[in-house]
């Protein structure tokens, strides 16, 4: 089945919740590395991707639409442009693989959704995107289920470690270092991040500094 993937992306001053462990330039590099992992996985499923980027950006493996507006507004602008099923996937999912995406794309339901931690939404697949409106921020997972009900969609909630792991806070970095296979892990390692084992705990260190 042909589908089109929409990837919202904020290239400038992204991932501010990681400011405690990375400066702005590093966060921008890390956001790009995670994006590359997402685009690679999407392309491996055989379909194309469009970045909904808040500022001009070059990405060799995806189309770029510059939309200087909020996440929900950018997605609601894009959904009606594609007359095919749509995958909405966040750019901060560096553990994603083509195989984990295939589980979403092979749903029998009208909509498949993957929750993120803390009430968010990491991935939505819509077979008929027409009447759907994005409702990101806050408890967006519940809001997206309500939106699906409004549209009369059947829904499958996908339980996937790789797709549920969005990288927002420093505690999340350990998942990239342990389970990542792509650019995001390489980038963290190049910055000196390592997995730290101390008194039965697993955490992250940067060089000699343990990041509590
Ligand atoms: N198009 C668009 N994408 C956005 C916007 N804000 C965030 N994103 C993207 O949406 C996804 C989820 O956003 P967040 O997890 O909040 O990322 P973030 O805003 O970089 O991180 P924080 O500053 O820590 O909140 C990521 O892929 C971001 O790049 C926006 O205003 N417009
Ligand atoms: C955009 C937001 O992402 P989070 O801040 O929960 O990672 C959400 O999933 O609604």
Image: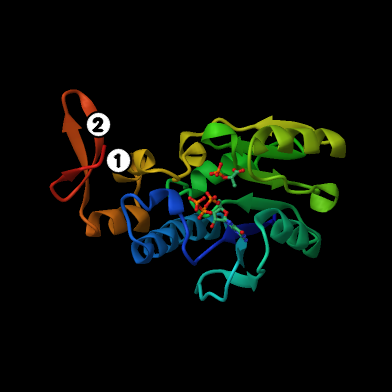
> x and y percent of residue 22 in the render?
32, 56
Residue 152 visible to an observer of this rendering = no
User: Mark 2 vs mark 1: which is more N-terminal?
Assistant: 1
**Ligand 2 contact, mark 2 (Cβ < 8 Å):** no
Q: Hey, which quadrant is residue 211 in on the image?
A: top left
- Mark 2 and mark 1 residues within 8 Å of each other at the beta carbon: yes
User: Relative to the observer, which residue lies in front, 151 or 172?
Assistant: 172
User: Relative to the observer, which residue lies in front, 3 or 151?
Assistant: 151
Packing grade of label 1 (10 A; few <14, some 14-19, many >=20) is few
Secondary structure of the residue carrying numbered label 1: helix
Query: Position of 170 compared to 74: left or right?
Result: left
Where the C terminus falls, by quadrant? top left
User: Could you tell me which residue is drawn at 60 percent across and 67 percent down?
Assistant: 54
| Disc marking residue 137 | none
> Is 42 above or below relative to 55?
above
Residue 118 visible to an observer of this rendering = yes
> x and y percent of residue 5 in the render?
64, 57
**Ligand 2 contact, mark 1 (Cβ < 8 Å):** no
Packing grade of label 2 (10 A; few <14, some 14-19, many >=20) is few
Q: Which residue is mark 2?
A: 202
User: Relative to the observer, which residue lies in front, 21 or 58?
Assistant: 21
Q: Which residue is mark 1?
A: 178
Query: Position of 161 compared to 135: left or right?
Result: left
User: Could you tell me which residue is drawn at 79 percent across and 37 percent down?
Assistant: 148
Name the residue furthest front: 20
User: Relative to the observer, which residue lies in front, 192 or 13?
Assistant: 13
Mark 2, mark 1: which one is toward the viewer? 2
């Amino acid at each position: 089945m042909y589908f089109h993937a929409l990837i919202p992306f904020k290239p400038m001053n992204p991932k501010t919740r990681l400011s405690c462990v990375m400066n702005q330039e590093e966060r921008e590099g890390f956001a790009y590395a995670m994006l590359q992992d997402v685009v690679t996985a999407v392309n491996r499923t055989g379909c194309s991707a469009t970045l909904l980027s808040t500022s001009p950006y070059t990405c060799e493996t995806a189309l770029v639409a510059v939309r200087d507006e909020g996440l929900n507004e950018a997605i609601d602008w894009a959904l009606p442009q594609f007359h095919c099923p749509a995958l909405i996937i966040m750019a901060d999912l560096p553990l994603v693989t083509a195989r984990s995406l295939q589980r979403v794309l092979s749903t029998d339901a009208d909509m498949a959704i993957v929750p993120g931690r803390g009430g968010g939404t990491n991935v939505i697949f819509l077979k008929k995107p027409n009447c759907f409106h994005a409702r990101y921020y806050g408890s967006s997972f519940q809001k997206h289920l309500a939106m699906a009900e409004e549209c009369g969609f059947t829904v499958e909630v996908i339980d996937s470690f790789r797709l549920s792991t969005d990288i927002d806070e420093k505690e999340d970095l350990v998942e990239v270092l342990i389970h990542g296979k792509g650019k995001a892990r390489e980038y963290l390692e190049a910055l000196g991040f390592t997995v730290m084992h101390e008194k039965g705990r697993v955490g992250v260190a940067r060089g000699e500094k343990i990041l509590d």
